[in-house]
Image (tube, rainbow, N blue to C red):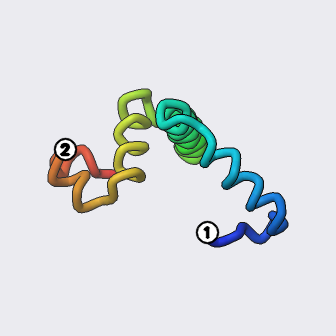
Amino acid sequence: MGKIPADTTFEAFARQLEIVGSMSAQDRLEMAIEMSEGLSRIVEAGVRHRHSEYEDEKVRLEVIRLKIGDRLFKEAFGKAAGDR
């Protein structure tokens, strides 16, 4: 069993694990994709909030940089793309 979140009771966490464990692999994958896409939208909104001057492409690149880190971003996109 994983670490129980601070705002969750043991019983609720156990029930969550039970429910997720009973899901098909396809359903778990779909849930993971939905959660990942939701997090990406939150990160994008945060970037837009902090940098209202950024155009769409700059926002897209910043979201990628935040996801993969500076080193890998610079390897993939070059130093100029990482300039802030």
Give the position of the N terminus as an image quadrant.
Answer: bottom right
Query: In the displayed structure, does residue 35 sit left or right of residue 11?
Result: left
Q: Which is more toward the observer, 73 or 2?
A: 2
Residue at 20% in and 47% down: 80
Which residue lies at the image location 25% right of the left edge and 51% below the top edge? 73
Residue shown at 23%/61% (left/top)? Answer: 71
Residue 35: x percent and y percent?
A: 57, 40
Instruction: Look at the image and tell me whether residue 35 can be seen.
Output: yes
| Spot occupied by residue 44 in the image (x, y as percentages of width and height) | 53, 38
Q: Residue 48 location, x and y as percent?
A: 55, 38
Residue type beneath disc 2 = Phe
Residue beneath disc 1: 1
Residue at position x 28%, y 50% in the image: 82
Left or right? Give the position of 30 relative to 80: right
Asked which secondary structure carries label 2, the reply is helix
**Tag in front: 2 or 1:** 1
Which of the two labelled residues, at mark 2 and mark 1, occupies the earlier sequence position?
1
Q: Is residue 52 visible?
A: no
Locate residue 31: give its quadrant.
Answer: top right
Q: Which mark is residue 77?
A: 2
Q: Amino acid at mark 1?
A: Met
- Examine the rendered structure and indicate whether residue 50 appears above or below residue 33: below
Q: Nearer the viewer, residue 69 or 81?
A: 69
Secondary structure of the residue carrying tag 1 is loop
> In screen coordinates, is 73 left or right of 59?
left
Residue 59 coordinates in the image, percent (x, y):
43, 36
